[in-house]
Image: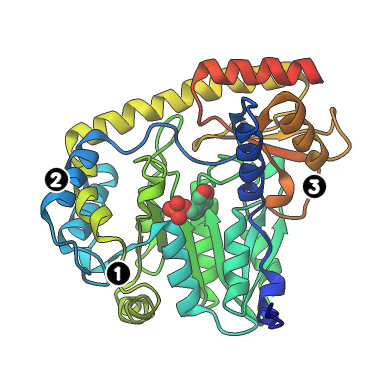
Amino acid sequence: MTRFDAMPARRMDHVAAFHVMDIQRRAFELEAQGRSIIHMEIGQPDFGAPEPVRARAAELVAGHRLGYTDTLGLPALREAIARHYRIVDDLDIDPARVMVTTGATGALMTLLGCYTNPGDEYLMPDPCYPCNRHLAALFGGRARLLPTSADTRFQLCADDVRVAWGPHTRGVIIASPSNPTGTCIARDELAAIVQTVRERGGITIIDEIYLGLSHGERQRSALDLGEDVMVVNSFSKYFAMTGWRLGWLVAPPEAMRPLERFAQNAAICPPALSQHAAIAAFDDASIALCESRRRIFTERRDLLLPALRAAGFGIPVTPDGAFYLYVDCGPLATTASALATRLLEEAGVAATPGIDFGDHDAERYMRFAHTCPAAEITRAVAAIGRIL
Ligand SMILES: Cc1ncc(COP(=O)(O)O)c(C=O)c1O
């Protein structure tokens, strides 16, 4: 037997596990043992890619060479993305500013990889999407988490950014609607943050992966706040194409060549099959389907929210979008982690404890994803009620 003694690089000490993936693994283990588990842990729509995308993919597999594409993505797809901004937001985005990536993850990785110097710090709300902190650490930077509360709908204020900005601050990363809270940042606050960052020569990254999944009126893209705003989006959520690993970013013209150089080396190009097929995601039929699914997510929110409240959870803010409820377990358990374990092991309901999303009040909160049919949501809440 040979032993492997090499230690991972020291920066990996700051790259924590993505807990939700560990919970999902345990849920799968229980299923393999014959247990029935309701999956409310992972942020994955249960619908799958729109039919026109699947049909196009089937044709492509049968008859296409599917070689590497341009690193920035297929020109036709970049144009389709730019056209989508014109239709939805009345925004004129030059396709040359659009880069197709391997999911929003690829977009975040490209931006952080390209712009992070060792010791750079990014301001982020606490709670926020876990991988942002870990990706910053992966490139020698770090996340500076700024505690938020229900008072600001768990979003940052420009004052938070002004106070926290220091000599090593490189920029701000915000998701709107947010994961895990589903809340949007107020438009004037976002504009003030962009201006604050601009005055300090930093970069603003806005993750709009859930923008298409609004429960009410859709918020406008942050792209109209200036060409210097960097926006991330994905086919994973609105288009329900998680496994296709496709997303995009929109960046200032001056940033495109360095971003391209990074991606040429890091990925060569995003998956060709997904790119060709994703052009069909912008067909009228696909959009009509995605819009009907968006309304289903709102119906599910309206089913789950009162039911969890009745079960004893506190829900301080009603989400504006996405498919998550961030709930206060304080009245029910000492720690959200212990409660998540109990819910999974005893009630067969997988949910994600707050520790995935930051430090502030992390053991008080838990996230439920309503990415399963209404009947399952009803069953899940009944099972939770029984064990509580
Ligand atoms: C806020 C946010 N950004 C990025 C991602 C990564 O998504 P993708 O599948 O496009 O890589 C997620 C996934 O859950 C997310 O919630």
User: Contact (CB < 8 A) between labels 1 and 3?
Assistant: no
User: Contact (CB < 8 A) between labels 1 and 2?
Assistant: no
Pointer 3 or 2: first along the chain: 2
Where does the image place residue 371, in percent across and percent down from the top left?
50, 31
Q: Quadrant of the N terminus?
A: bottom right
Q: Residues within 10 Å of mark 2 (few under 14, many from 20)?
A: few
For label 1, the residue is: 269
Closer to the eye: label 3 or 2: 2
Q: Residue at x 62, y 45 (%)?
A: 25
Where does the image place residue 82, in percent across and percent down from the top left?
23, 55
Residue 357 relative to residue 297: left or right = right
Q: Residue at x 55, y 77 (%)?
A: 200
Q: CA distance from mark 1 to mark 2?
A: 21 Å
For label 2, the residue is: 59
Q: Amino acid at mark 3?
A: Asp
For label 3, the residue is: 361
Q: Quadrant of the C terminus?
A: top right
Pointer 1 or 3: first along the chain: 1
Q: Amino acid at mark 2?
A: Glu
Name the element at disc 3. Answer: loop
Where does the image place residue 345, in percent across and percent down from the top left?
75, 31
Closer to the eye: label 1 or 3: 1
